[in-house]
Amino acid sequence: MSKIIIGRYIPGDSLVYKMDPRGKLLITILFILAIFLANNPITYAIITLFCFLAIIATGLKARVFLNGVKPLIGLIFFTSLLQLFFMTGGKVFWHWWIFSISSYGIVNAIYIFVRFTLIILISTVMTVTTMPLEIADAMEWLLKPLKVVKVPVDKIALVISIALRFVPTLFDETLKIMNAQRSRGADFNDGGLIKRAKAIAPILIPLFIHSLETAIDLSTAMESRGYRGSEGRTKYRVLNWSKYDLISLAYFVLLVGLLLIFRTH
């Protein structure tokens, strides 16, 4: 759990770090939507290549992104297996009761696996190269049109940035509690599913208490600094678009163009 990457900012000075956080957030969202345009091996190969180029552009080691995928690999496999055993169509290789393995199911299982992996990887690129406060500013900018209908955009952006910031903190605290329980003889890997669930139960109460204490401390700190949302608030960091954002947008337009050209209709 100490290797959880989501929400952790890793300092760097590559091209991706120099981008405006608004550009990074916008391209990340559009990239995730573009993944769903891929529907054949060529388009999946193109979008996978572009994702790896984005990873290389961060200048970070590959294990950073592998650690971003590891916590969710079980969920990805499970979703892929559902596609494998329940999707029908094409040539049937095996069938029993409600389960079957067909050529259509195999292809869809592979596509689902690649799709979820790419979504996690590109999201990791965003979170490790952008500070939580920058993400909050970018979210506030992206949601700004909703202010017309009285949506509290600044509060939503703040909640999202705090959530991103405290995800790794929560996992670290969970690891500390688990290690403390292990030192008292607890075993979280022995026995069946029910026994493991019972072993995890003693972790939940101290973790819940710690989360409440952290939330109270954070709210007290914000109140002591006079935080009142966007009311009378100015920006310390002024966001500016740069040439790197234009390069990235051109990179994304090229990606969408290639996907539309090679997409099966």
Image (cartoon, grey):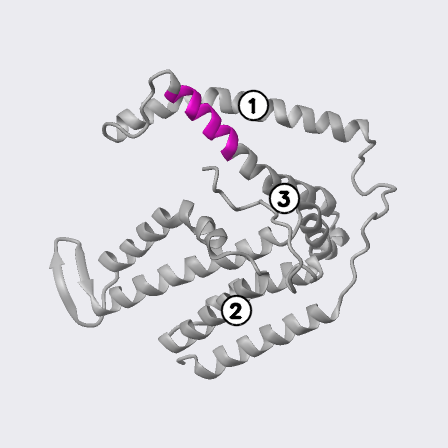
Give the magenta part as a residue range.
171-182
Residue 165 image position (x, y, % from top left): 61, 40
* Amino acid at pointer 2: Leu
Q: Residue at x 55, y 38 (%)?
A: 167
Amino acid type, label 1: His
Q: Main secondary structure of the magenta part?
A: helix
**Residue 173 rendering spot, x and y as whole percentages:** 52, 29
Which one is closest to the eye, mark 3 or mark 2? Answer: 2
Secondary structure at badge 3 equals: helix
Q: Residues within 10 Å of mark 2 (few under 14, many from 20)?
A: few
Q: Mark 1 or 2 closer to N-term?
A: 2
Quick one: quadrant of the C terminus?
A: bottom left
On whether residue 233 falls in the magenta region, the answer is no
The residue that disc 3 covers is 160
Location of residue 223 by image quarter: top right
- Residue tagged 1: 210
Mark 3 residue crowding within 10 angstroms, few (<14) / some (14–19) / many (20+) = some
Work out how far the residue at label 1 is from the one at label 3, CA to CA, in angstroms.
20 Å
Looking at the image, which residue is at 80% across and 26% down?
224
- Pointer 1 or 3: first along the chain: 3
The residue labelled by disc 2 is 53
Asked if disc 1 and disc 3 are in contact, CB closer than 8 Å, the reply is no
